Image: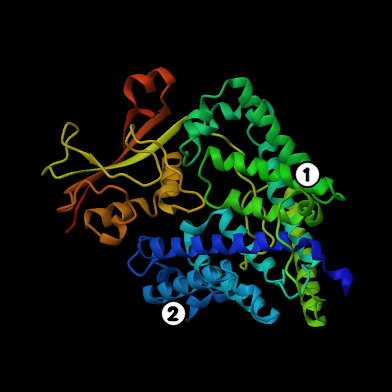
């Protein structure tokens, strides 16, 4: 079955699989760090309560056998260990069926976490990791040539990521059509990075060039991914460069990193070998066994059928973004920033030890790792690691009702001095004893101008807009 495999694609497979395993590793490590305080037995939105209300078919996973924090730790720890081993090459030194089993286990373990993660895991890149992880099961290992159908499934995934993101922008906020959205986006994006201040202060004509280039990269270039070589490789290069630009300008967890990895599937391996100082390809790339060909064909047919829903969504004027159409998170729809906010608002949690809360009292702020807080603290780079609480605090500032189910509970955990919750924060201003009151204060933030930056050394300027939530007292 020589038609089935492409020996020249060995490097593409190597890059995709090792990179995907590293992203899995980060995802499992994030679950070990965050899941228990956010959704564990005593979490802000406890997973056991969710499991009492949902059926297995609606959210399949291992935790329908019973959730405990210890089992979550076992699942995430096993996933982290396996993904680290795969990243180091384990899947290439075992038989083909074992390699497929390793990738299947990684996918099933992470699916089990996502499906009980509730709002903390309701991000498009969670579904993207699961969809890419499922396709990776059928990429094979070093014992066979990379299967062509699976490579095209990965290209189809990149196509939907890019075109979905492009269409949601073009159909959404008119500033995208006017090429003015990037006058605001670098400042108002959920979690700016260390270079975002400089991106924001680029000349406005360059912002318009950025927006126009984005439209080309997301609305036109994706079609060229399917073109004969070398056009497909050049299209992949455009996708990769675009994703690197996005990585430099902000923090979007592993969305951009995974997209550029998947785009490598469209790169011509022989072309890369001629222009890059690469080692010789691994020997022993034999023909794929019949059973593997059959399974890959079945997976391809399944994805073709499930593609009906995202394609219909892409063609719809009411296009939804970042939506899964099935509980296995297979063949999803993607897209982001159909609307760009013009002003940045931040919810800052402030506590006091005063016996009565007063406007002029002594209030001290809790500081988060990623979201803006202290105006003199430069934004940090955290992607591809995902800080879920920090992200949701951005949504809380935009839509107060969005945070109603969990923000008061977060404040209660801080008032109780809950150690697991406090470990999610960068600074606890009350290390000796919890405060008597905590309030959620709303501020408008903007980047300082270059002149303000030189005078104050601050990265942000902020204006106090009053209470987002009034002072809440400890019940302990």
**Residue farthest top in this picture:** 451
* Occupied quadrant, residue 249: top right
Quadrant, the C terminus: bottom left
Q: CA distance from mark 2 to mark 1?
A: 49 Å
Q: Which scheme is used to colour this image of the protein?
A: rainbow
Q: From the image, tell me which residue sits under label 2.
A: 66
Is 346 displayed left or right of 476 in the figure? right
Question: Residue 319: where, in percent of width, then height?
Answer: 69, 46
Question: Residue 475: where, in percent of width, then height?
Answer: 18, 57
Quadrant, the N terminus: bottom right
Q: Height in image: 173 above or below 163?
A: above
> Which residue is located at x 63 percent, y 74 percent?
91
Query: Nearer the viewer's eye, disc 2 or disc 1?
Result: 1
* Occupied quadrant, residue 461: top left
Query: Quick one: SS at disc 2?
Result: loop
Disc 1 crowd rating (10 Å Cα; few below 14, some 14-19, many 20+) is some
> Which residue is located at x 19 percent, y 33 percent?
359
The reply to whether the C-beta atoms of the residues labelled 2 and 1 are less than 8 Å apart is no
Residue 333 visible in the shown view: yes
Q: From the image, tell me which residue sits under label 1.
A: 234
Query: Quick one: SS at disc 1?
Result: helix
* Occupied quadrant, residue 8: bottom right
Q: How many marks?
A: 2
> Which residue is located at x 51 percent, y 24 percent?
201
């Amino acid at each position: 079955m020589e038609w089935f495999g492409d020996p020249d694609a060995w490097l593409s497979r190597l890059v995709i699989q090792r990179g995907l395993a590293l992203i899995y590793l980060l995802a499992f490590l994030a679950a070990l760090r965050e899941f228990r305080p956010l959704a564990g037995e005593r979490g802000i939105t406890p997973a056991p309560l969710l499991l009492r209300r949902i059926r297995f078919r609606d959210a399949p996973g291992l935790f329908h056998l019973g959730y405990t924090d210890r089992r979550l730790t076992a699942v995430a720890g096993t996933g982290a260990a396996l993904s680290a081993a795969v990243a180091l090459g384990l899947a290439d030194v075992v038989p083909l069926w074992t390699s497929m089993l390793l990738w299947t286990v990684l996918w099933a373990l992470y699916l089990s976490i996502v499906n009980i993660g509730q709002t903390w895991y309701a991000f498009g890149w969670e579904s993207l990791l699961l969809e890419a992880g499922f396709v990776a099961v059928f990429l094979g290992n070093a014992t066979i040539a990379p299967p062509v159908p699976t490579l095209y499934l990965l290209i189809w995934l990149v196509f939907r990521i890019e075109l979905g993101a492009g269409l949601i922008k073009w159909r959404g906020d008119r500033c995208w059509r006017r090429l003015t959205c990037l006058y605001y986006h670098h400042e108002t994006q959920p979690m700016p990075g260390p270079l975002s201040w400089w991106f924001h202060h680029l000349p406005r004509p360059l912002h318009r060039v950025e927006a126009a280039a984005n439209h080309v990269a997301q609305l036109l270039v994706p079609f060229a991914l399917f073109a004969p070589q070398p056009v497909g490789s050049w299209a992949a290069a455009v996708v990769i460069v675009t994703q690197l630009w996005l990585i430099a300008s902000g923090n979007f967890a592993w969305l951009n990193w995974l997209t550029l990895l998947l785009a490598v599937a469209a790169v011509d391996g022989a072309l890369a070998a001629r222009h890059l100082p690469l080692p010789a390809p691994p020997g022993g790339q034999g023909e794929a066994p019949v059973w593997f060909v059959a399974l890959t064909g079945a997976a391809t047919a399944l994805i073709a059928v499930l593609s009906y829903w995202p394609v219909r969504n892409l063609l719809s004027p009411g296009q939804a973004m970042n939506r899964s159409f099935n509980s296995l998170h297979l063949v999803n729809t993607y897209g982001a920033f159909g609307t760009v906010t013009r002003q940045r608002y931040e919810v800052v949690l402030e506590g006091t030890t005063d016996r009565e809360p007063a406007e002029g009292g002594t209030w001290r702020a809790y500081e988060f790792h990623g979201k803006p807080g202290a105006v003199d603290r430069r934004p940090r780079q955290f992607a591809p690691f995902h800080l879920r609480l920090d992200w949701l605090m951005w949504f809380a500032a935009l839509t107060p009702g969005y945070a109603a189910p969990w923000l008061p509970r977060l404040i209660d955990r801080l008032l109780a001095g809950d150690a697991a919750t406090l470990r999610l924060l960068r600074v606890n201003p009350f290390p000796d004893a919890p405060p008597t009151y905590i309030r959620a204060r709303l501020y408008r933030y903007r980047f300082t101008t270059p002149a303000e930056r030189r005078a104050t050394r601050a990265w942000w300027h902020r204006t106090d807009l009053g209470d987002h939530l009034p002072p809440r007292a400890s019940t302990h």
